[in-house]
Amino acid sequence: MLKIAVLAGNADPEVLIHGASSLTAGGTLDASATSDLTIRTTAQPNLLSKVIDPTIDGAVAVTVFDSTAVLSISDSASVSSTGAASLTAGSTLTAITFGDATGDDAGAGVAVSVIYGDTTASIQNATVNGSSVTLASSSNRTITTVANSSAGGSSGNGGKNERLDRRQHLYRRR
């Protein structure tokens, strides 16, 4: 039995201070848009798959994930602090995608990871005051993608002779 696992998602924290917004702090000001995630997508055989149909094997795992963090101060907004102002955006993502057909008699293992997104911290056409101002963004992504085929590989099919089956089918059609 073909095992398929798909994970699609997003982590998109945003801090937006814009327009006529005015933010004042009597001390330090810390504003941050952050995400810190670990995701895992795994497709692998189990006992039930061998019982249902041992002739259809393989494992496919797909991860599609948007990892974006945005801190933006713009459009005439005003931010002030009597102490330090720290404005940050951060995105940390660990993604593991595992297509494992090793427990099957035959079949390929396929794993695909598609990770995208930007991490930004910005000040545009706005005013930010403080005893010190820190503007920073950081992104840390660790992507692990592993595909393992069965001992029979993708040409195996759980014990059936696929070429013979095709020839017999073509012969019967004549």
Image (cartoon, grey):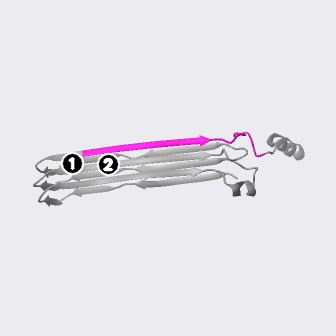
Label 2: element kind: strand
Residue drawn 45% across and 45% down? 115
- Residue receiving disc 1: 123
Indicate which label's residue lies in the foreground, 2 or 1.
Answer: 2
Q: What kind of residue is marked 1?
A: Ile
- Give the Cα distance between marks 2 and 1: 16 Å
Q: Mark 2 vs mark 1: which is more N-terminal?
A: 2
- Residue receiving disc 2: 90
The magenta segment is 136-158
Residue drawn 10% across and 55% down? 82
Asked if the stretch drawn in magenta spans residue 131, the answer is: no
How many numbered marks, from 0 up? Answer: 2
Category of crowding for the residue at label 2, using alpha-carbon neighbours closer than 10 angstroms: few (below 14), some (14–19), many (at least 20): many
In this view, the residue in front, 30 or 114, is 30
Residue 132 left/right relative to 171 = left
Category of crowding for the residue at label 1, using alpha-carbon neighbours closer than 10 angstroms: few (below 14), some (14–19), many (at least 20): some
The picture places residue 62, in percent across and down from the top left corner, at: 55, 48
Residue drawn 36% across and 46% down? 118
Q: What kind of residue is marked 2?
A: Gly
Asked if the stretch drawn in magenta spans residue 141, the answer is: yes
Residue drawn 31% across and 55% down? 14
